[in-house]
Amino acid sequence: MTNREEPEEKERSLPDFPAPQADEVTEAAPPIERRATPRTISRAFDRSKGAAFLVGSGILLSRLAGLIRQTMMARYLGAGLAADAFNAAFRIPNMLQNLFGEGVLSASFIPEYAGLLGKGDENEATRLAGAVAAMLALVASIIVALGVFTAPWLVAIIANGFTGEKRELTVLLTRILFPGAGLLVFSAWCLGILNSHRRFFMSYTAPVLWNLAMVATLLFFHKRHSEVQLAIYLAYGSVVGSALQFLIQLPQVMSLARGIRPRLTATSDSIRNVFRNFVPAFVGRGVVQLSAYVDAWLASYLGNGAVSSFTYAQAIYVLPISLFGMAISAAELPAMSRAVGTTAEIGAYLRGRLSDGLDRIAYFIVPSAVALFALGDLIVLLLFQSGRFKLGNTIWVWQILIGSTVGILASTMGRLYSSTFYALRDTKTPLRYAIVRVILTTGLGYLFALVLPGLLGLDRKLGAAGLTASAGLAGWVEFYLLRREMDKRIGRTRLVPARMARLWGAALAGAAIPWAYKLAVGRGDPILSAHETVVRTKLIALVLLCVYGLTYLAITAAFGIPEAKNVIDRSRRLFNLVLRPR
């Protein structure tokens, strides 16, 4: 019996991992198991939460700067021809930043680089960083050259529904933006090094400069220029911002990786491992980014304003996914990558971190989903409604946000599962399931956006909401496949049903207060309207949203949810810090 079990254990063994740091040995034992009662908070996971807080804070500042940029764009470009052209072309630098930043380098570079640092082999880590920099220089140069040359064909893929002046403007803007996209690739390389050294804040706040450069461009050039001219100036402002985002990180990178020299080589196992994992990670993240292009391509057939409205909605519903899903995943990846021990010990360690991360994600994403569905009009009014962005635009964007609530929880949890696979040096499994997701997104998106509205006699504008709803359904399929495969590797990981019921109940109770206020004061307005007679100012919208958030926090604290206590304690410390005498 023993002889039969030993080969089976060897066959199921996970890849070799570098030596752990002292605090992570404590984290690995004993394993944290799932249970219906509230879990205790250990110091080991507090450290992870501190890292996630730094990542989240950086992302929050970056996203707030992005929302300011989007607000200014809505004010000065509106939702017409120029806005559609710019938003379609602007997807390219965003795609490359997402592809290399949180995708390829997170999957291939960070696990190896962080592992070398964990072993104390800083010289080899520096050589690895230089080899990756040289590889990225080659890849970025090729991408920029191809992008400038093939811009007309790229626009045909991105927004095939554009014709005439709108198509020509999109081609021009795409060519202007591509050099900035190349600079963002190197910004992503900086992010990988800083994250591995646990310098999270700088890497995630650097995009603030990118956004501020674009805001400054809008403020400086909006007078005496047409919308088309302003869009062109804004593209140049984006390139300048990309350079600033890279340069602000470079001094800290050079101080951490001393003596770094870009050199394209594959003389060590760590370099070969990065290059080996780079291709499936690149294809996998590319497939995910392709899904966004499919959505934009389908939206281009829904009439003027569809692409820009979809983009404004995306800026809102991606915020909680990035703020919580990306923050937690980015903080967990370096620590997960250092797991050591037997198969059972590694499984217990990863299962504990994964389960804890899922609980934290659910605490923040559940109220986000309810807010987007019930109070999306308040959010859009607060952020975008001004200037050329009118009430009708607010309702259209809200409808798109309602569609996004279908899969926001699955998409966010799926990021953490993907990071766990990356920590296991497995980039192929997320690739397979990403392909499944994109195929479903394309098929369902075409059905929901272009076919069903006509069959049901609905306004074709609702097709944009169908795009986000179909993407959500595909996200749930991908999440289920990732979770099923991970269960086979490390054991079962699930959210506790009783705890989830409390979260949903608290969120619905919190939303009921502003919802009832809107219905009671604006009796003549339809249920799904922006209630213009009720919410007359942005201040009222802000107050109602704050009431919702505070109600959710109070109810979950009364339920004894650990994350509520963490939020209250951290808020109290920040409040005391602000009020402390100088």
Image (tube, rainbow, N blue to C red):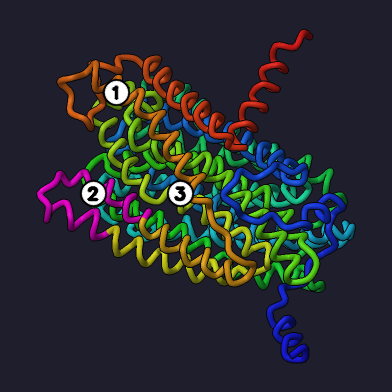
Amino acid on which disc 2 is placed: Gly
Provide the residue designation for mark 3. Answer: 409
Residue in the image at 84% along x and 43% along y:
255
Residue 213 at what x, y percent from top left? Answer: 55, 31
Q: Nearer the viewer, residue 71 or 371?
A: 371
Provide the residue designation for mark 1. Answer: 516
Mark 3–mark 2 Cα distance, whole angstroms, equals 22 Å
Residue at the front extreme, as displayed: 37
Residue at the top extreme, as displayed: 581
Residue 195 at what x, y percent from top left? Answer: 72, 48
Let me know if residue 374 is in the magenta part: no
Q: Nearer the viewer, residue 572 or 577?
A: 572
| Numbered tag placed on residue 278 in the rendering | none
**Magenta-highlighted residues:** 446-472
Q: In this image, 329 relative to 458: left or right?
A: right
| Numbered tag placed on residue 463 in the rendering | 2
Q: Is residue 65 visible?
A: no
Q: In this image, 329 relative to 7: left or right?
A: left
Q: Is residue 339 visible?
A: yes
Mark 1–mark 2 Cα distance, whole angstroms, equals 29 Å
Is 210 located above or below residue 407 in the figure? above
Label 1 Cα crowd, 10 Å radius (few <14 / some 14-19 / many 20+):
few
Find residue 541 and report its image quarter.
top left
Q: In this image, 463 relative to 158: left or right?
A: left
Task: Compare marks 3 and 2 and give the one earlier in the sequence.
Answer: 3
Amino acid on which disc 1 is placed: Ala
Let me know if residue 454 is in the magenta part: yes
Count the labels in the image. 3
